[in-house]
Image (tube, grey):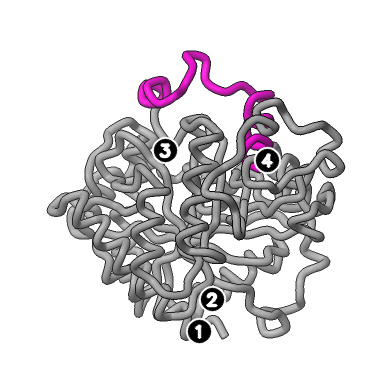
Amino acid sequence: MTHDLASPLASTAPSSPSAATRVPLSVLDLSPVSDDGTSRDALLATTELARAADRLGLHRFWVAEHHNMPAVASTSPAVLIAHLAASTERIRVGSGGVMLPNHPPLVVGEHFAMLEALHPGRIDLGIGRAPGTDPSTAAALRRTTEGLGAEDFPRELLDVLGLLGQQHEEETGRAPSPFVRRFSATPVQGSTPEVWLLGSSTFSARLAAALGIRFAYAHHFGATQTMEAMAAYRAEFRPSAQLAAPHAMISASVIIADSEDEARYLAGPSRVMALSLRTGRLGPITDPDTAAEVLEKLEGSALEQVLAQLPGTQIATTTERAVDELQDLVDRTRADELLVAATTYDVATRVDTLERLVRAWV
């Protein structure tokens, strides 16, 4: 169930879910690898989920970037996006996100310019500041031994935007960098990807606001600054040529079943995976029975306390209660869109959750 969040915006929220207009629904998928499957199986499952999301009329389908994790097959968002966009018909496909510390801006700009040329009007570029992996792998991925500092990330983000023709001197208060004056992303743009800044802190929220771009808050794994970040983004937003008013998305981890007990049972593998990530005991995602045994053995232990104190949130419940909790989250954060993620042992559970949610999200 979700953690309770004090809401400084509560007074602006609709008085009840029925009084609110439902915001668009989208999907984030990590391509989880099961303990009896392969990375190929995981990527094919992500393709199946994307097709289901397309069929169900969802707005976006995003894939993550994680490295050196046995439980996650999604390492190269641009490659996977190309496949998923070609495998679907109308849904927007994007990154949740590309981890900018791992890539030169020119590479990011050219990858997404090409994706947009191939699938015009359907590509999202979500950019993140974290490396998406452990420190040793991050060091192997990065282009310098020091990585990106606090000042480097905004500059490189501006370079990506500039390469895509989305930042101008009058908006940023600074002339384009020599890099942007020298290079442009190719293929030559007929249209441009929709750019989002992702984050789980007020830093990313304020940077997105200053640049006048869309902002997505990762509430599903970092709920500690949700309200502050969403409020800061709206309060400090500066209009740009691409975006006249703030536009924010909130994410949530959601697993839906016929009963509370069944939903918690199906959510067990994701809880064990989350604990594995925090304790450095990485491995493929286990089946629900095995996960239940692991969680039972944790009762009364220090690791149970670690699990209870993880900063993310998860909604594992029935359809009606899930819709109520999600609408409450949207109301409190004033989000314009909702991004749902579900790490489950099998894709059938993820598809079933989407089908139940879409039927009720009216």
Residue position marked by numbered label 2 in the rendering: 323
Q: Does residue 288 appear left or right of residue 59 in this picture?
A: left
Q: Secondary structure at mark 4?
A: helix
Residue position marked by numbered label 1 in the rendering: 360
Q: Quadrant of residue 199?
A: top right
How many residues crowd mark 4 within 10 Å: few (<14), some (14–19), many (20+)? many
Residue position marked by numbered label 4 in the rendering: 162
Q: For the residues carrying marks 2 and 4, which lies nearer the camera in this image?
A: 4
Sequence-wise, the earlier of marks 1 and 3 is 3
* 141 drawn magenta: yes
Badge 3 amino acid: Val
Q: For the residues carrying marks 4 and 3, which lies nearer the camera in this image?
A: 4
Residue position marked by numbered label 3 in the rendering: 306
Residue 261 visible within the image:
no
How many residues crowd mark 1 within 10 Å: few (<14), some (14–19), many (20+)? few
Badge 2 amino acid: Val
